[in-house]
Amino acid sequence: MSAKPDLLILGDSHAIALKQGADLLGLPAEELQFSGAGWHDQRFALGENGLEVRGIPRAAGQLRALREKLGVADVFASGIPVLTTVGFHLGRLVPPFGWNGHQLQEEDAAEITEGLTASRAFARDYVRHYRRRHFRLLRRLARLTPLIVVVPPRVHDRPNYDSFTRIIVEDLRGVGLTVYDPAEDLAGADGFLPDNLMAEDGIHATAECGAMMIAAMREQGLLAA
Amino acid sequence: MVEKSDNPYRHLPAKAFWRTGVAEAGLFGLSGLWSSAWTLPADAQFATFGSCFAQHISRALISRKMNWLNAEPAPGRTPPELAQKYNYGVFSARTGNIYTAAQLLIWARLASGAIGADSVEYWTDGDGLVHDMLRPKIEPQGFVSRKEAEASVASTARAFARCITEADVLVFTLGLTEGWINTATGQSYSICPGTGVGTFDEGVHAFHNYTYPEILRDLEAALQIMWQMNPGLHVLLTVSPVPLVATASGDHVLVATQYSKSVLRAVAGDMAHSHAQVDYFPSYEIIAAPSSRGTFFEPNMRAIAHDGVDLVMRHFFAGLDLSAPARRAGAGGDAGRAAVEAQMQAEELVCEEMLLEKFNER
């Protein structure tokens, strides 16, 4: 058993920047990370020992190692603050929604004049269908330990991504979860993450950006300094 | 020239006589009830709209793996229960039930661009949610704003336009002569305001039992718009055999039902006789004529039993002529498949008119 880390980081590929950011800041952090596809496909469960990973051997091994390292069965109930990107996985959720050309008509957006529209109520139900278990997991974790859900950075304006992000954030906040949206602190004038904070893949944040997010959360009192 | 000892009836087929055509044939021996007026391509695309009964035609086409055009499917990977909740896959576009010719005319005008979504009446409920009075139950809760509601009507109008321009056959089931209109704006309602959505105002909302000339006029106008958009469009009219839930005419509901169906049947027949591109399919007769002895009505004497729908569709497919060569290779695609999957899961008919029964307090 080693010393307790300051942070636990749980999530998909967007969690990588948070872990790298913690490393840059010199904050001891441990992570459990697997793909957005795995999260979307609900390769997780809540068992006797809290979060369990199903069907992803690498991640299951990572969780086992973490339990041994921390000397606890339920890693995410040990009181260590958790930063998580669980619940979004937009790359698996949003594109299928648009397969038949559907878009959501947002109040602040131009009138949609081509293709099909779906209502916000429908989209919310759609999100809840695919994310019900994720939200349940997050609520459970939040009861056991300080938890901050971190919104993935806004890096493009592909149809429906902003709408889905907004819906998920509203739902998370609606059930009392703490949400940190980097767009509120780090976005440029155009509302997107600046190029210098974006990884080469154009999707994820850099380590520096991860560090800035953690710093912002600490400044705002979301995370103990 | 008919000879003295001869007469025209001597040369008529067995189906022209009640004894041989109906009485001796028996309910399940009826044949030659309908023969398609058109030779259609093997991959002909069908679009379906109209009253509740039209939903059966949608499903039958899908179950036969025919080309049912779903121009407004649910978003990809929508679970079936969610698609059903939001009325996706019920008709070829998300129009909801189109009960009257007047409402069909509105959709045709919306599809052609003659009027915009802003011309439709919208109603905001006590929770601030917005409903369009053309499709009052299309969303289970309503739209979050007028802008979203208008966007949805416009979206459905585009899908309806696609049905007009891409379908080979538009199947339209006439359902009601009775309706409600806004005397100030002329808006035709699909259900009476105040019975589910909207607030009834007796100073503005008026009952209207559309007459034969009015229905003929509106149907003719709607089809002329559609033919301007697609001169090759075939229109197959049917009349719903489902009786009225309630009548506001003052007559007994049985009498009102027979009046309504008779008028609709006459309009459909006359349209078919006067236009080569219009045909009439006798679903009404198969279910409601004396030959069925009411067999296909459920105990409430209104809903149509599954066996009745099956028989109707057997006659439909028996009379359909799809012998012309197919034109499209690999019809379908991801969007079509997803919509079909969603549609196949649907179990419950969607019928706003059923809302009226809750006002029967006896």
Image (spheres, rainbow, N blue to C red):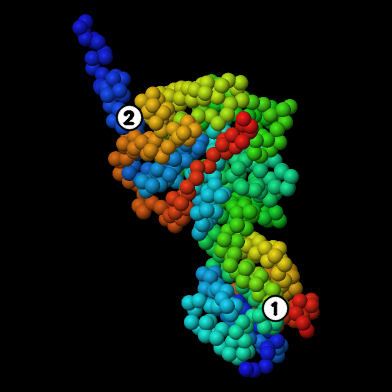
Residue visible at 21% across and 9% down in the picture? B6
SS state under label 2:
helix
Check contact, mark 1 vs mark 2: CB within 8 A. no
Q: Position of residue B356 (x, y in %)?
A: 60, 34
Please state which amino acid type lies under the numbered disc 1.
Thr
Comparing B290 with B64, the one in front is B290
Q: Residue B317, how many percent across, how many down? A: 34, 38
User: At x 66% / y 70%, what residue is drawn?
Assistant: A139
Measuring from the top left, give residue B290's x and y in whole percent.
39, 24
Q: Position of residue A30 (x, y in %)?
A: 63, 86
| Chain name for mark 2 | B
Left or right: residue A194 compared with residue A53: right
Question: Which residue is nearer to you in this view: B38 or B256?
Answer: B256
User: Would you place residue B186 above or below residue A121 in this image?
Assistant: above
- Corner quadrant of residue A69: bottom right
Residue that mark 2 sits on: B27
Which corner quadrant holds the C terminus of chain A?
bottom right
Q: Residue furthest bottom?
A: A2
Residue hosting label 1? A145
Tell me how far mark 1 sits from mark 2, CA to CA. Answer: 71 Å
Disc 1: which chain? A
- SS at badge 1: loop
Count of numbered badges drawn on the protein: 2
> Quadrant location of residue A207?
bottom right
Can residue A173 be seen in this snapshot?
yes
Residue B282 relative to residue B361: left or right: left
